[in-house]
Image: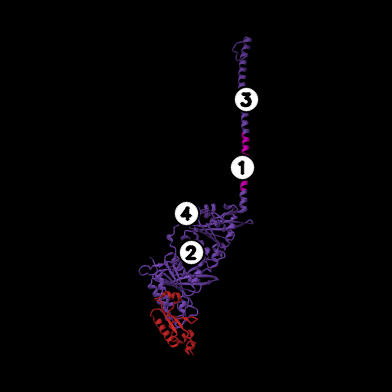
Amino acid sequence: MKSTHIAPGPVPKKALTGIVGLDEITGGGLPHGRTTLLVGGPGSGKTIFALQFLAYGARSVDEPGIFVAFEESADRIVANADGFGWKLPELRDKKLFFIDAQPAPDLIQLGNFDLGGMLAVLEAKVSEMGARRIVFDAIDIVLALMPDDAARRREIYGLHAWLLQHGLTGIITAKAGSEVTTTETKQGEQPFGFMQFMVDCSVVLNHFVVQGGSQRSLRVQKYRGSSFDENESPFLIGKNGFEAAVARPIDRSALKASKERVSSGIERLDTMLGGGYYRGATVLITGVPGTAKTTLCGAFAEAACLRGERTLFVSFDADSNEVVRDLSSVGIGLETHVENGCLRMISARSLTGSAESFLVRLTALAKDHGARCVIVDPVSTWIKSNDGIGVQGVAERLIDWSKSEGITLLCTSLHDALSNSGIGSVSQQMATLADTWIQLDYLVQSGERNRGLAIIKSRGTSHSNQVRELILSDSGVTLADIYTAGGEVLMGTLRWEKESAERVAVEVAEVAAELKRVRLDAEQTELEMRVRSLQTELVAKQTEKELLTRTTAINERDLTRGDNQMRELRGADVAPPESK
Amino acid sequence: MTLAMNEPVQYQFRLFVAGDTTNSAQAIANLRALCRAHLPDRHTIEIVDVFHEPARALADGVFMTPTLVKLGPLPGQRIVGTLSQLHAVLQALGLGGIAE
């Protein structure tokens, strides 16, 4: 085991608290059989923390518990915790025992006293119900009654010894800032200083306001014999109780990089990305308002739901119903998926709180829903609610979390946020960390605005370098090739014009070709005819020539015969003399 | 003055103690001394050791010891501590006049 602290001997046994995040921070829970001091101001969540620890013990790990209530009555505590779904009334008395130990308001205190009565009662109860966990809520109330620090110290040490002796895992809560101040208490001393030294583990809860937003945080101050996350971790009190943000450094080597592709919901975008997003990847879509960021989210959500993957859609800008309605106008039907529970729409507009608490809430919601795909639209609004401190942490943690859970995360971000808020803005941070970054833009040209989509980066995948035009219609979302002419990108009407011009040109060319073919045909026919007529002429000429030859031969023969006949007639020699 | 007319009020006390710890022993001694001095023959003291009878401590909601519970006469009263300041204890028990 690697540890920054030197842990002598074996790692102490730990008692799981069931508190989301805390078990990770402490590496397995509070020290088992030891005492933990929980200090926090009023309303910082001490009672809930302690109660959740007991409820989890009683319900899930078969460790019955006792709750000693010094401040609020047990009935009120149980009633207040009703909203958390721990079903305390079910556990009460058998596995979870409450002791009302509030000092009566009219109680008179004269002289020294001790907590012997309480220990006697507890002793009996512990052996009766086999309790393993115990909580002393608001010990400061009873300490305030004690006459001096010596008495306080004596009682607390007595209590601690008793806890150790019985091997109980205990939590003692005390209000910070309410420590009894006497001359003996030095200024600047740790709250309940002596208790801090006594206990094996100490947890501090803070509740403060940052720029009007409530922020809660938790810090493990000490943990004997164990390493722990020493940083302050934001937490919130959510639907299921106490939830702390885990800043655990993810062991990157343990992450399985999936080669599986998931569809973006837009066929041509998948093609551009070489098959879609990677499963478990973080996708960032940036753009100015109205560039159809939400539409891309919707397309992705629909595709995920059609694959049967549970999806969480967190919308910061619009109400869930509006998002569903608006998306249906571009042919993205989310309604059925919402109805059958596959898709969970969360409208985060009304939520207040720090970015950190959103993160905690988001992870809790996703876990609750069993989401494989999470959409945050837009992440820039979310981060706006933070003052900038820890923003990097939020973005990083969001991505770390989604990766460790194998969740495909789709975030949108306003482009403004990217350019204006400078270094450290979450969009910028996200853009660096995201696996795929898609940029949406308006292109204003010839009095038109058209949407353009470009993939700026997509890790581990060959992707198209070309800007595409994003076309929304009531039948869905498509991408169209854009025309580049004279170094200019043509979109919208210009693209359409270019397209029709091209169509006309093709038609013209076709007609021209047809015309030419016809003309050539005609010429061919003509030539053939001429050839035929010439051939006829030729034949005639040949015949004529033959005739001529024959005639000439006859003539000659006739002539010769005529001569001879003449000679015969004249009685001359057959062979006439050469000269007359 | 007859006893019948002035039937003295009986003081009923229950003192929860934690074994023989110093605080508890002091409380027992202080209470007995007080009763002897101010409530002779008109008091009853029941001493409950929480280590022997934790159920009674739980039932009475006693967690700090020693705790003196005045059961009668009404109104009841609880006093936590060693009862070392006699005057204050008498005041608290409604016996202020006697102390004078």
A73 left or right of A550? left
- What color does chain A have in the rendering? purple
Amino acid under disc 2? Arg
A74 left or right of A330? left
Q: Which residue is mark 2?
A: A397
Q: Earlier in the sequence, mark 1 or mark 3?
A: 1
Residue A391 position, x and y percent, is 51, 66
Q: Which residues are magenta?
A: A501-524
Q: Earlier in the sequence, mark 2 or mark 3?
A: 2
Amino acid under disc 1? Glu
Alpha carbons under labels 1 and 2: distance apart: 62 Å
Mark 3 residue crowding within 10 angstroms, few (<14) / some (14–19) / many (20+): few
Residue occupying the far left of the picture: A9
Secondary structure category for the residue under label 2: helix
Q: Which residue is mark 1?
A: A510
Secondary structure category for the residue under label 4: loop
Of all chains, the one bearing label 1 is: A
Mark in the foreground, 4 or 3: 4
Q: Which residue is mark 4?
A: A260
Secondary structure category for the residue under label 1: helix
Q: Is residue A496 visible?
A: yes
Alpha carbons under labels 4 and 1: distance apart: 47 Å
Residue at 47 percent across and 58 percent down: it is A406
Secondary structure category for the residue under label 3: helix
Q: Earlier in the sequence, mark 2 or mark 4?
A: 4
Q: Earlier in the sequence, mark 1 or mark 2?
A: 2
Amino acid under disc 3? Ala
Relative to the observer, which residue lies in front, A273 or A403? A403
Q: Which chain is red?
A: B
